[in-house]
Amino acid sequence: MKPLKEKISITVDSDLLEKAKRFAEEDDRSLSQYINLILKEHIKKAEQEN
């Protein structure tokens, strides 16, 4: 069973958004999937550092 997801609204810099869209496309993922992946990796790394 997939974990539940929540919809949110965020504001990001336009240059950051364009780069994220490009990387998501290159990785054959939706923007949402790509951002989720990036956040998971960042949080995992931050937790390992603490």
Image (cartoon, rainbow, N blue to C red):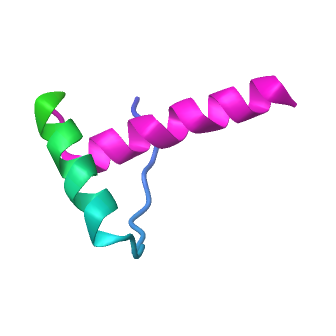
Q: In the rendered image, is residue 46 in sight?
A: yes
Q: How many marks?
A: 0
Of the pair 14 and 44, the residue shown nearer to us: 14
Q: Residue furthest right?
A: 50
The residue depicted at 31 percent of the width and 40 percent of the height is 34
Q: Quadrant of the N terminus?
A: top left
Residue 9 position in % (x across, y down): 39, 75
Left or right: where 1 falls relative to 27: right
Of the pair 31 and 22, the residue shown nearer to us: 22
Of the pair 24 and 3, the residue shown nearer to us: 24
Q: In the rendered image, is residue 3 in sight?
A: no
The residue depicted at 27 percent of the width and 49 percent of the height is 20
Q: Is residue 14 above or below residue 49?
A: below
Q: Residue furthest top?
A: 48
The residue depicted at 37 percent of the width and 46 percent of the height is 35
Part of the protein shown in magenta: 28-50
Residue 36 position in % (x across, y down): 41, 43
Q: Quadrant of the C terminus?
A: top right
Quarter of the image where one finds residue 26: top left
Left or right: where 13 falls relative to 20: right
Q: Residue furthest front?
A: 15
Left or right: where 47 falls relative to 11: right
Residue 11 position in % (x across, y down): 40, 76
Q: Is residue 6 above or below residue 44?
A: below
Left or right: where 47 falls relative to 40: right
Q: What is the chief secondary structure element of the magenta stretch?
A: helix
Quarter of the image where one finds residue 18: bottom left
Magenta stretch: residue 37 in it?
yes
Magenta stretch: residue 47 in it?
yes
The residue depicted at 16 percent of the width and 44 percent of the height is 22
